[in-house]
Image (cartoon, coloured by chain):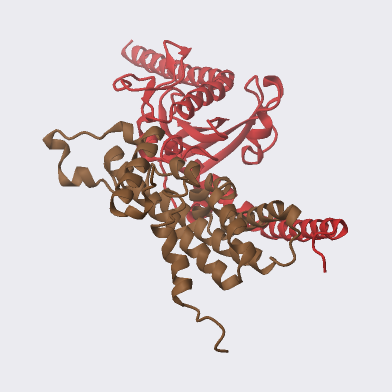
Amino acid sequence: MDVNKNSYTIGFATLMVIIVAALLSSAAIGLKPLQSKNIEQEKKQNILKSVGIELSRELAEKDYSNYIKEELVLNHLGEIQEGSAFNVDLSKELRKDAKDQSLPLYIAQINGEERYIIPLRGKGLWGPIWGFISLEKDLNTVYAAVFDHKSETPGLGAEINRPFFQDPFTGKTIMEDGKFVSIIVQKGGAKGDVHKVDGISGGTITCDGVTGMIEERLSKYLPYFKSISTSMQVQDALEIVTQDELNDTISNINKRIID
Amino acid sequence: MSDKKEALFSKKNLKLVKDPLDDNNPITVQVLGICSALAITVQLKPAVVMALSTFFVMCTANVVVSLMRNMIPSRIRIIIQLVVIATLVILVDQTLKAFVYDVSKELSVFVGLIITNCIIMGRLEAFALANNPWKSFMDGFGNSLGYALPLIVVAFFRELLGAGTLFGYPVIEKLGLYELGYENNGMMILPPMALVTCGVYIWIQRMRNKKLIEEN
């Protein structure tokens, strides 16, 4: 048979396309459930890692609910909406206007202390980067951070998912005199500065992406932080007031007894 | 087996494996696949992973194209080759993602790089289209080894001199060289030094193998 005839060429190409398409789509559909399970487990693993709990993927899935007590969805005013943070797809939310975005927030209980976990997502050099950053109860000090990426350069930008880059975030603060300053990843000389972290040589654009991502994401949560920190202050104040009243009554009683 | 048939590991077939390692190395002699070789030689681990994935894709693609060699219309053969490579790579990627998720994360960026690796297409075009599947397999095997060798050598020196580690293990620190005032050369992890290291590799290879020196 003449393999160079036009009709043969077109026929061959058509057949090839159909076979390849069938092969690829059946592989994609057939493997999808297994893949999404892996991705979900990894998300849980990363959320736990951002509050300092390192577990394998399988264990993370099991222990997740023991640590994560609340999965909130907030609006841009910091009000709690219906829904679960885990189901919010940040990549979709980021495409919306700031006003329409749903903001996921996880609250973990570790040794009786609350930690606030904020999911991050931004742009690296080649593709998306993401992560989780957890704040202590004061809503200022970073407890821990994890980052990951889709396709940053191996050995350079891709190193943002290594401990040597992530560990220095612990203990940094995001506020300065009540104003939001975020945390900056910079080239060298960040030691000793509470708002700065050392970057990775050769991975500057990815590191700038991390800086941008942290600032953009955290700034969206400020209204919520404000509202809960005022409620915390009110609670503290109330406690002081009741304590004072109690003291007054005690001293009054004492006076009466003496009188 | 008839007498006319060649033995599986005849001298000619073994030459298909040996040639690409030195005399006809795809990277250092043909200077193909340089782009991916430069991109992933910062550390040993990604270099090894890349070498393994290229090994798999090159051997399989060579065999598949060789099996189809009498059916492929010559006018669209390049597209067919590309489709075969891309399909294989995506299938591998999907399977890894489902069953060995951690390995697939390690591979992330390489998937794209494998498809665009000119060595694979070069071998399909130059060899698999004209030879039987077994020979094509040997050719793919040899060329992927020939690709892996300079890759791993370059990655070894770049990771050792640039970061002071090998496979992430802090070799220099354990040897106590930092206390004697030794410092890592940060330049080694930047892309230009991949080219320079590759150049040094080619230089040494040509010093050893006089066949490679062109006459002026």
Residue A65 visible, this angle: no
Quadrant housing the N terminus of chain A: bottom right
Residue B135 visible, this angle: yes
Furthest toward the bottom, the residue is B2
Answer with left or right where residue A153 lies relative to residue B183: right
Furthest toward the left, the residue is B180
Furthest toward the front, the residue is B216
Q: Position of residue A13 (x, y in %)?
A: 80, 56
Q: Position of residue B195 (x, y in %)?
A: 39, 38
Answer with left or right where residue B200 lies relative to residue A229: left
Q: Residue at x 46, y 77 (%)?
A: B9
The answer to which of B12 and A37 lies nearer the viewer is B12
* Vertical placement of residue A4 versus A69, above or below: below
* Vertical placement of residue A141 versus B94, above or below: above
Q: Position of residue B58 (x, y in %)?
A: 55, 59
Quadrant housing the C terminus of chain A: top left
What color is chain A drawn in?
red
Answer with left or right where residue B182 lies relative to residue A116: left
* Vertical placement of residue B133 versus B189, above or below: below
Q: Residue A56's image quarter? A: bottom left
Q: Which chain is brown?
A: B
The answer to which of A27 and B25 lies nearer the viewer is B25
* Vertical placement of residue A208 versus B73, above or below: above
Q: Residue at x 67, y 30 (%)?
A: A93
The answer to which of A208 and A37 lies nearer the viewer is A208
- Disc tally is 0
Q: Position of residue B8 (x, y in %)?
A: 50, 79
